[in-house]
Amino acid sequence: MTAFPTDDAPRPRRWLLLLPLVLFLALAALFLYRLGAGDPSAVPSALIGRPAPETFLPPIAGLTRDGKLVPGLAAAGFKGGVTVLNVWGSWCVPCREEAPILMRMAADTRYRLVGLNYKDRTADALKFLDRYGNPFVAIGADRNGRAGIEWGVYGVPETFVIGRDGRIAYKLVGPITETNLDTVLNPAIEKALAAGL
């Protein structure tokens, strides 16, 4: 004889069967929201507001600009005026893409545009600057990447804005583009220029 379920018999709870699917969809939605939220180049840096690292880097041997040898980097050069430091390498594809923007930025004499040549060979760096132009008034050669570590470099290119007081005011991770130049980098430079007037 077959027993028929009564109202008192336990029934499987259908919502328990759907719980894994609901949790998965909630996590996927959160992931997609976080992925699209914010600027990926806005990586927080522990150096913001702190003095620029004591950087003493030799110049790229044989590099000239306007008939004069281009000096290396010295920490003392970061005080007294606003400096924009760009970390680049000849082997870096995005560095080629931002090169024309850096050349335009070099025309602005309100700040110093300097470079940190990261883990590069002298001959390759010279070829890169010959091909794309040299926007920098000073370039330090960081052959072994030690200075990059001190600056907290995640990868190249990266750009730092250093205020008149020698403190790091802003860090941009990734290449300078027309969009982030207008929306974040130029405003950070303007803010640094206005400070201490």
Image (tube, rainbow, N blue to C red):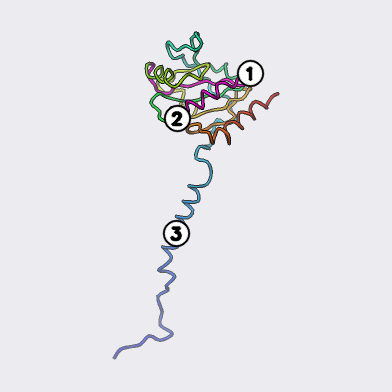
Q: Which residue is mark 2?
A: 97
Q: Quadrant of the C terminus?
A: top right
Q: Which residue is mark 1?
A: 80
Residue at (42, 12) in percent of width and height = 61
Q: Position of residue 85 (x, y in %)?
A: 53, 24
Disc 3 residue crowd, few under 14, some 14–19, many 20+, Cα 10 Å: few
Residue at (52, 47) in percent of width and height = 37
Amino acid at dot 1: Gly
Secondary structure at numbered mark 2: helix
- Which residues, given as a range, are shown in magenta? 98-122
Residue projecting furthest to the left? 1
Q: How many marks?
A: 3
Amino acid at dot 2: Glu
Closer-to-camera residue (78/104): 104
Q: Which residue is mark 3?
A: 25
Secondary structure at numbered mark 1: loop
